[in-house]
Structure formats: structure tokens, C-alpha cells
Image (spheres, rainbow, N blue to C red):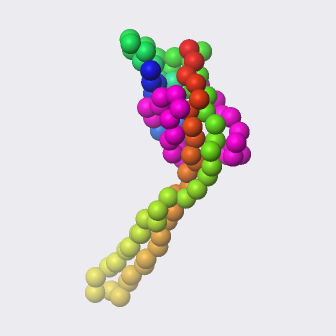
Amino acid sequence: MYAIVEIAGKQYRVQPDEKIYVPHLPQETGSTVTFDKVLMHFDGAARLGVPYISNAKVTASVLGHGKSDTVVVFKKKKRKRYRRKHGHRQQFTEIQIKTITL
């Protein structure tokens, strides 16, 4: 059994007891969060939403927060002595899926 759920504007394929990394969520570590934007549910037969399945929910617990690896942004204009080097680390939240209910 799995579901496709929309979390923070992105779509994820989730199963019970699975750990995934999603964009930063404001919930505290150890709290429970519920996602109600379920696009599809599959349990032997596919059930599609238009655009979402009504009364379907995915419950997850927040395991922790962190930052991803550094992405280097380098700009250069040749023959103009212009160079800029910046780095960026995107914040994420690690969650564990508990249940998928219809």
C-alpha cells in the first residue's frame, strides 16, 4: 500500500513506516503532522483524486531538522575581473510516515 501526497508544493510517494526528507516544516521535533492533500492511493487498485481524495489523510511524526549539502553558486564575466562565489544550504525536515487512512 502506498499513496502520493503533496507536501509543501512537492509530490512524494509514501508508505507506512518510511522515512523521507521534505522541505522545512515549522513543527517541533517529536510532534505529529497530518497531510490531507492525497493525490492517489494504491492498495491493489488505484484510487485517484480530482485533484485530491476527500477524507484521505497521511499521518507522520517529525524526527528532526537539518541542512542539506552546500550548493556552490559561481558567477563570472570574462575579461571584466568579475567573480562571485556563494554557497547555499537548503533546510529540510525528516519525517516518518505512520498511517495512511481513507
Task: Return the residue nearer the eye: 16 or 47.
Answer: 16
Q: Give the position of the N terminus as an image quadrant.
A: top left
Report the number of numbered marks.
0
Question: Residue at the location (47% across, 70% down)?
Answer: 87
- Work out which residue is located at the far top of the displayed protein and give it: 45
Q: Is residue 54 visible from the viewing direction of this image?
A: no
Q: Which residues are magenta?
A: 12-36
Q: Is residue 75 above or below residue 10?
A: below
Q: Quick one: which residue is furthest to the front in this view?
A: 17
Quarter of the image with the C terminus is top right
Q: Is residue 23 magenta?
A: yes
**Residue 41 at x, y = what percent?**
45, 19
Q: Place residue 67 in its image quadrant.
A: bottom right
Closest to the observer: 32 or 76?
32
Is 72 in front, or is 65?
65
Is 18 magenta? The answer is yes
From the top left corner, tell me how far across and down residue 89 is, in percent.
Answer: 51, 62
Residue at 47 percent across and 62 percent down: it is: 69
**Residue 94 at what x, y percent from top left?**
56, 46
